[in-house]
Image (cartoon, grey):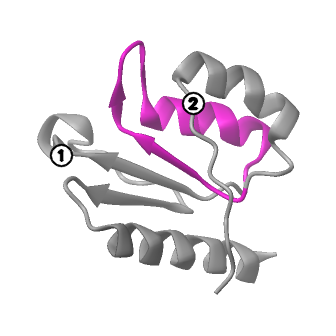
């Protein structure tokens, strides 16, 4: 099994460090609702530099978080609470699909 390195950051840190580390990122996992921003907006911003970046949006508040929204390509939603294995399966599928598209 391949190992992965996880970078955890608050929204301001994530945004400022992304420009320097964008070539190293394999995928992004973000909450849908965060203080000061929303996960879909963060993913959209990150994809301006990396359109192929796979993303997982997570939330325990599905109704108000993504109501009526279609997920963009290379994006998945995982409802909280989730099991780590479910998150990893979803992440692996997104990464695999992104590699197949290249």
Q: Residue furthest top?
A: 36
Give the residue at x 46% y 37%: 40
Query: Which secondary structure, mark 2?
Result: loop
Toward which corner of the image does residue 12 lie, by quadrant? top right
Is 45 part of what is drawn in magenta? Answer: yes
Q: Against 95, is 21 above or below?
A: above
Decide whether residue 37 is among the magenta residues.
Answer: yes
Magenta segment: 26-51
The x and y percentages for residue 77 are 35, 58
- Looking at the image, which is closer to me, 49 or 18? 18
Residue 63 or 81: which is nearer the viewer? 81
Residue labelled with disc 2: 9
Q: Are marks 2 and 1 in contact (CB under 8 Å)?
A: no
Q: Is residue 16 left or right of residue 57?
A: right
Q: Residue 8: percent from the left, percent from the top?
A: 57, 38
Quadrant including the N terminus: bottom right
48 versus 24 height, above or below: above
Residue identifier under label 1: 62
Above or below, 37 against 79 in this view is above
For the C terminus, the image quarter is bottom right
Tell me where residue 79 appears, x and y as whole percent.
23, 56
Residue 75, numbered circle:
none
């Amino acid at each position: 099994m391949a190992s992965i390195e996880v970078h955890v950051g608050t929204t301001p840190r994530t945004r400022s460090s992304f420009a320097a580390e964008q070539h190293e990122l394999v995928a992004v996992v973000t909450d849908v609702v965060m203080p000061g921003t929303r996960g879909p907006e963060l993913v959209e911003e990150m994809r301006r530099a990396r359109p192929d970046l796979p993303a997982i949006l997570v939330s325990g508040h599905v109704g108000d978080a993504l109501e009526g929204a279609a997920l963009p390509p290379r994006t998945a939603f995982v409802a909280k609470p989730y099991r780590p294995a479910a998150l990893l399966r979803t992440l692996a599928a997104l990464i695999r699909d992104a590699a197949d598209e290249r």
